[in-house]
Image (tube, coloured by chain):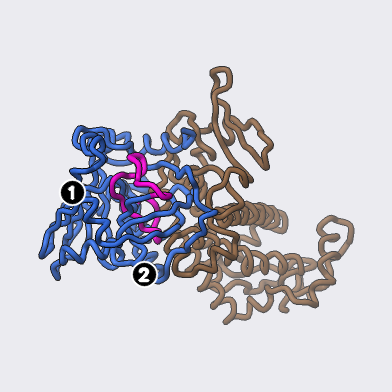
Amino acid sequence: MTEPGRDVYRHGVAERTTHWLWALALLVLFMSGLQIFNAAPYLDASDKSDPQRRVLAFDAQLVAGQPVGTTTVFGHVLHTTHLFGYTDDGMGGEDERAFPGWITLPGPQDLADGRRWHLLFAWVLVFAFVVYLIAAAARGTLRELVLRPSDLPKLLPMQLYYLRLRPHPPPHGTYNPLQKATYTLVFFVFFPLLILTGLALGPGVDATVPWLTVVFGGRQFARLWHFTLMVLLFGYFGTHLVLVVSTGFWNNMRSMITGWYRLKEGDGVGP
Amino acid sequence: MKRGLFVASSLAALGASGCGPIKDNLTNGPFRNVLASAQWYNRMAIDTRGLARLYPDSAIDRNFRVNGLDTPSDDRYKRLERDGFRDYRLVVDGLAERPQHLSLAELRAIGTLSQTTRHDCVEGWSAIGAWNGVRLAAVLALARPKSTARFCIFHCFDRDSSGQPYYESLGLHQAAHPQTLLALDLNGAALDPDHGAPVRLRIPTQLGYKSAKWISRLELASTLSGLYGGSGGYWEDQGYDWYAGI
């Protein structure tokens, strides 16, 4: 069923637009989220703040007159000066800051504006995601993307192919079984949980939908989940970039900008 | 206190220019109003329909974290504190049919209630305290708000390092929430100066900066514009959202 060299129309205009829109939203949310995190640079597995249940903490202290940035993970102290704890202050110097100014939005310490960027682009993400789901469902893309029980036996062969331990991928549709597993995880686990754990941090939300905060183990725990999901999504993003580049960068970019994708050896067509 | 180096530096960055936080060009440009608009969507989506969670005594933080501006140190406050706030009067005025001057005893006589709730700071941390006080709605009812009143403004004794007074405000429907208290006691004892003595606001359905400490006067008003920075509160004037439910 593979016809290398043939152009297929893969992504509809709504899917392409929302893809880039949430890419932008996730970048802004990532950077402004780190800005917000810097205001209380520690995470507790509890409801109220509880140093006894601290999982991660960034700090700065003076050691022999020199500022040292520290990262404490489950009680293990690492020296991370310039990287975490004592870092770029976004104004040309260094200061006690968990995440450096070059990776936060805004650069200098500014919780108020960090929150504004974050809360506005949270709406952008939700909007883009909902529009995408509707458009992708209407065009049938969603059906091709979602992992099905019949895909499960193909996950290992696909991974072996990626590891170059197998000459050919198992037969599959437009998306291979690992892609399907990843997109299913990102769309139906990461995105919803990121939004819900973020909402659970609001005292107004907690009063309106009390079970939400309870489900995540309390407010500080929800903050820990929110941060953890961010790290996992960042890991997904890195993998996504590597694959976009390694499986034909220009062809992939063209398909996500114009919609047209040129089939190559091993690509599947249709579900 | 360990509260941090981090908090101190963020406050310094906020207050450094005296008239507002340091802003980068992107945030400060025409996009600023778009950025600020998110709080209205949040308010529409969330508002607050329910009640904040109540906690058992075992959850209480006995050393409740001190936050906010420095405890007032001016003569007026010091004199009141020295006399155990005997001469303190909470002024309730503005758009009121019957302006009030209430002593602490008169406030308590309205009827107090206790609630153990979580305080959620905008910075991200949370602490649990047992608050005892008077429903704000009951105090405002005594003053009989005029029909034109839409906001309750909280004037406070504290000032920042550049002399800017702290103030806050709530819409009257937020003020009427049954858990919105004028707190008089924390964890079984009268509020100490560091925690906002003699009267502070406690609104568990919004972030901590709304819960103004060291309140001297409640003003009923029809608008927030024209008052200080015009955004309805000390932190709001520095870019924080007026609606602080998230």
Front one among A232 and B56? B56
Q: Identify the magenta region.
A: B186-209
Image quadrant where one finds the N terminus of chain A: bottom right
Q: Chain of mark 1?
A: B
- The residue under label 1 is B89
Residue shown at the point (36%, 50%) measured from the top left: B185
Direction from residue A28 to residue A160 in the image, left or right = right
Q: How would you rate the neighbour count of disc 1 (Cα within 10 Å): few for under 14, some for 14-19, many for 20 or more? A: some
Distance, label 1 to label 2, CA atoms, is 36 Å
Q: Is residue B106 left or right of residue A64?
A: left
* Disc 2: host chain: B
Work out whether A234 lies above or below A18: above
Q: Colour of chain A?
A: brown
Residue A25 in the image: state x and y as whole percent.
50, 58
Please state the horizontal and vertical placement of residue A49, each as a whole percent of the image: 53, 48
Q: Which chain is blue?
A: B
According to the image, label 2 marks what residue?
A: B44
**Residue B19 seen in render:** no
